[in-house]
Image (cartoon, coloured by chain):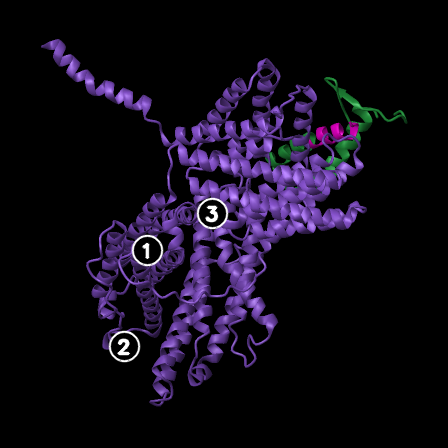
Chain colours: A purple, B green
């Protein structure tokens, strides 16, 4: 009995052990897929006796991602980028083969353009990077000999195509996973997250007056959104169901982005109204909240595969007239702004419901709204990165020309330029961080190349070695933050090994690779300082100055002048400032994470993140004010309030100008008193103007627009005080210190 | 200093002297600037980026002249 009982107890443990042995984790499956793809890609390239099998192998290693569709998308970008870059390389060689200086001038201009474009969208980032790489490969690796150029271009495209084909087939055979399932799951998580955020917003801000938890929740939603966007790109490639419905999916993507943005702005706006009981002033707030919540529930239901139980009911939040009339004018204005957000929320949730209904085939297709045109705006940070790549390429070229005997010669310049182009995606990572992965990769590759590879005599042995190395690297360095190490290890191992049908072993191969990479570090280190410093603390302060200059420019554009904003130049300037103000807070948050402790001094990393969040709020408020200013205003109201509005605007411009030079220039309490005095004066003027106004002098719409404008003004003033409060805890003198 | 061009041999690998001097100069500059940062002495320099390049140049010349003796 005892023995039987003991055995009975052992059974589950044994089965768990078996499961843990035989059920592979997702990471192990991914590593096996990558290793098998690399082995097959090398096998094909060696069988076909191509000159550089490493290109097939490296393509297979670099494009193997978790989901087959993502791999195919990346591979297609690699091939199309290769073709585009090769063509540009041919054209440059055809025109300037006799004059290396002209050739390199035009090549560096093309590189700058491709880097600028690569930083525009995540979807086409890899395409433009490859388009830049291949022009360099065709132009430089061939050492100005056109015969080589064509051969190299064809071989590289061939290698990339083989890699893509192999990865696609391996992805279809070994644990195939369609992106659609992951995409649906990602959308379900997003919708559920949005519903929870909405519930928290309606409950916590009004009841607890707290937005702290919401910021963290919003950050999680943004990371879910990034995954959703990437999966959608992949699913369009590997799922015909998604491809067929791609217009509805893209609408859904835009609506999700709009909802996240609106809810973030809503949470900030509700926070300013935390002292008011909103249910008292918005007549149908409870019904409105219930309706929006029900819409999210129905969308989640459809995504689970069930038909919706009810369609959205149109609902417009409305103010309770008598109750609102008891409020001060600025509270009325804030309520008007809040109501506008709620109306927008109602519109977008309705549109999301229609898009999901179409995707899940539960009803008629939703009508597509016309696509808004986005005008071209110059982004200074992308320009800076383009300038850095150009400077690095020129430095490498000059070293090759004027220092005789540099290993690899023009090939080294090509390698350096390609790595610098790739580095633009992680510009905030300091160059010393690259040294460790490079040294480790070289030390890892050296014994294998020198001691192990010469012992091999067949492809089977080589295949086992390749499988083991790629599997180990992909399995061990599987986290996204370990990507740099993973890429370096595989790339340097394959470069050093330089596997060919007629294999040669030469210490020079290893030494030259080491020297080329050392030269790369030298040049990257120099271009981190010159021509524009890329040190995170320098970039942070520069961006902060630009943010406030953008705010100043945007505030100046609010001037009430007859010819305001009519010229092309003033419109372009306004768009440029708006772009700077809306994009810089996110960039500041990213660069802020990489500021060295020695530069931060007594400032904690969380303080810098809070500062970036307060800037984001300021950016939202500035955007809100610009939008409110664009609506038609009553000439009578404007006439009465013009002087006070101008006083407030000029005062704000002066504050922004001071903050652009010295972020610690303002003292929170003094600023609060000053802005409150200006707003109080403005409120008194409004009261007097409205008391004196004859009935019918201004319409209800004009009245609403004026409140909208006043609400935005108050919001901006409060956001500015909030920033100054956050800025007080930062060790600015340490941050601004000159540093290498 | 001899007027005859020659190469540096490291483990049988021949390298241009300027490259070796440049690499050593960069390492020396990184160490120097790291120490200057650590002891907060870099704040006394105007435009450290230019100082960095000047240091690389000075170290290269010093290493070439006195250590590699080209």
Q: Secondary structure at mark 1?
A: helix
Badge 2 crowding class, 10 Å Cα cut-off, few under 14, some 14 to 19, many 20 or more, is few
Where is residue A268 drawn, in percent x and y?
Answer: 36, 59
Give the residue displayed 36% in from the left and 66% down from the top. Answer: A367
Give the prevailing secondary structure in the magenta stretch: helix
Callout 2: residue from which chain? A
Q: Earlier in the sequence, mark 1 or mark 3?
A: 1
Label 3 to label 2, Cα distance in Å?
Answer: 41 Å
Q: Are marks 3 and 2 in contact (CB under 8 Å)?
A: no
Quadrant position of residue A207: bottom left
Labelled disc at residue A325: 2
Quick check: A463 above or below A189? above
Quick check: A557 above or below B6? below
Residue wearing tag 3: A608
Q: Secondary structure at mark 2?
A: helix
Position of A696 with respect to A53 (left or right) is left
Residue A269 located within the stretch drawn in magenta: no
Labelled disc at residue A359: 1
Label 1 to label 3, Cα distance in Å?
Answer: 41 Å
Please provide the residue range marked out in magenta: B16-26
Where is residue A430 drawn, in percent x and y?
Answer: 57, 38
Quadrant position of residue A717: bottom left
Residue A520 visible in image:
yes
Where is residue B13 drawn, in percent x and y?
Answer: 74, 21
């Amino acid at each position: 009995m005892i023995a039987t009982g003991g055995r009975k107890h052992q059974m589950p443990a044994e089965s768990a052990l078996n499961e843990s042995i035989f059920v592979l984790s997702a990471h192990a499956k991914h590593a096996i897929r990558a290793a098998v793809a690399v082995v097959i890609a090398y096998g094909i390239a060696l069988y076909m006796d191509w000159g550089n099998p490493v290109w097939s192998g490296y393509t297979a290693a670099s494009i193997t991602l978790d989901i087959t569709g993502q791999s195919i998308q990346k591979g297609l970008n690699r091939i199309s980028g290769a073709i585009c870059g090769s063509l540009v390389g041919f054209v440059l060689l055809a025109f300037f083969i006799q004059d290396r200086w002209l050739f390199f001038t035009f090549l560096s201009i093309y590189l700058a353009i491709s880097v600028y474009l690569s930083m525009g969208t995540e979807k086409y980032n890899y395409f433009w990077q490859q388009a830049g790489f291949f022009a360099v490969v065709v132009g430089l690796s061939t050492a100005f000999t056109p015969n080589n150029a064509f051969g190299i271009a064809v071989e590289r495209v061939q290698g990339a195509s083989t890699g893509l084909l192999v990865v696609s087939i391996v992805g279809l055979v070994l644990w195939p996973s369609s992106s659609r399932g992951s995409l649906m799951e990602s959308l379900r998580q997003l919708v559920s997250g949005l519903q929870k955020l909405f519930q928290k917003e309606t409950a916590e801000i009004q009841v607890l007056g707290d937005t702290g938890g919401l910021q963290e929740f919003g950050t999680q939603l943004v990371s879910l959104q990034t995954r959703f966007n990437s999966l959608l790109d992949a699913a369009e490639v590997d799922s015909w169901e998604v491809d067929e419905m791609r217009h509805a999916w893209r609408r859904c993507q835009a609506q999700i982005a709009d909802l996240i943005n609106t809810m973030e702005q809503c949470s900030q706006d509700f926070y300013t109204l935390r002292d008011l009981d909103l249910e008292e002033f918005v007549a149908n707030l409870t019904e409105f909240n219930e309706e929006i919540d029900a819409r999210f529930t129905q969308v989640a239901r459809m995504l689970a595969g069930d038909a919706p139980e009810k369609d959205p009911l149109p609902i417009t939040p409305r103010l309770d007239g008598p109750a609102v009339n008891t409020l001060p004018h600025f509270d009325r204005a804030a309520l008007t702004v809040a109501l506008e957000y709620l109306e927008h929320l109602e519109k977008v949730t309705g549109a999301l419901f229609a898009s999901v209904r179409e995707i899940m085939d539960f009803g008629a297709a939703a009508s597509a709204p016309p696509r808004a045109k986005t005008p071209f705006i110059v982004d200074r940070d992308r320009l800076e990165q383009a300038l850095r790549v150009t400077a690095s390429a020129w430095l490498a070229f000059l070293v090759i020309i004027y220092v005789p005997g540099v290993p690899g010669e023009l090939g080294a310049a090509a390698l350096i330029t390609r790595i610098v182009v790739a580095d633009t995606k992680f510009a905030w990572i300091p160059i010393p961080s690259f040294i460790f992965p490079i040294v480790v990769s070289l030390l890892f590759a050296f014994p294998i190349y020198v001691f192990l590879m010469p012992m091999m005599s067949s492809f089977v042995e080589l295949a086992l070695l390749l499988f083991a190395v790629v599997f180990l690297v992909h399995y061990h360095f599987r986290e996204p933050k370990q990507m740099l190490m993973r890429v370096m290890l595989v790339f340097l191992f394959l470069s050093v090994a330089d596997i060919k049908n007629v294999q040669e072993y030469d210490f020079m191969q290893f030494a030259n690779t080491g020297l080329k990479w050392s030269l790369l570090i030298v040049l990257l280190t120099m271009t981190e300082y010159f021509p524009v410093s890329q040190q995170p603390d320098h970039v942070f302060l520069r961006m902060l100055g630009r943010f406030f200059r953008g705010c100043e420019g945007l505030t100046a554009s609010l001037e009430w002048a007859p010819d305001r904003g009519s010229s092309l130049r003033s419109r372009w300037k306004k768009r440029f400032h708006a772009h700077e103000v809306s994009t810089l807070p996110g960039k500041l948050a990213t660069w802020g994470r990489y500021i060295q402790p020695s530069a931060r001094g007594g400032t904690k990393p969380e303080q810098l993140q809070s500062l970036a969040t307060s800037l984001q709020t300021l950016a939202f408020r500035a955007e809100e004010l610009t939008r409110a200013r664009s609506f038609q205003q009553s000439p009578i109201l404007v006439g009465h309030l013009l002087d006070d509005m101008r006083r407030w605007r000029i005062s704000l411009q002066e504050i922004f100008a001071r903050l652009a030079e010295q972020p610690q220039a303002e003292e929170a309490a003094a600023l609060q008193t000053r802005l409150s005095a200006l707003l109080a004066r403005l409120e008194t003027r409004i009261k007097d103007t409205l008391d004196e106004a004859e009935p019918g002098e201004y319409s209800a719409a004009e009245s609403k627009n004026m409140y909208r404008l006043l609400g935005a003004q108050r919001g901006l003033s409060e956001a500015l005080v909030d920033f100054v409060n956050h800025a007080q805890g930062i060790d600015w003198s340490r941050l601004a210190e000159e540093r290498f | 200093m001899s007027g005859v061009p020659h190469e540096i041999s490291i483990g049988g690998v021949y390298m241009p002297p300027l490259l070796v001097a440049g690499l050593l100069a960069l390492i020396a500059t990184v160490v120097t600037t790291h120490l200057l940062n650590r002891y907060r002495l870099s704040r006394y320099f105007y435009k450290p980026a230019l100082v960095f390049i000047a240091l690389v140049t000075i170290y290269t010349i010093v290493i070439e002249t006195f250590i590699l003796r080209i």
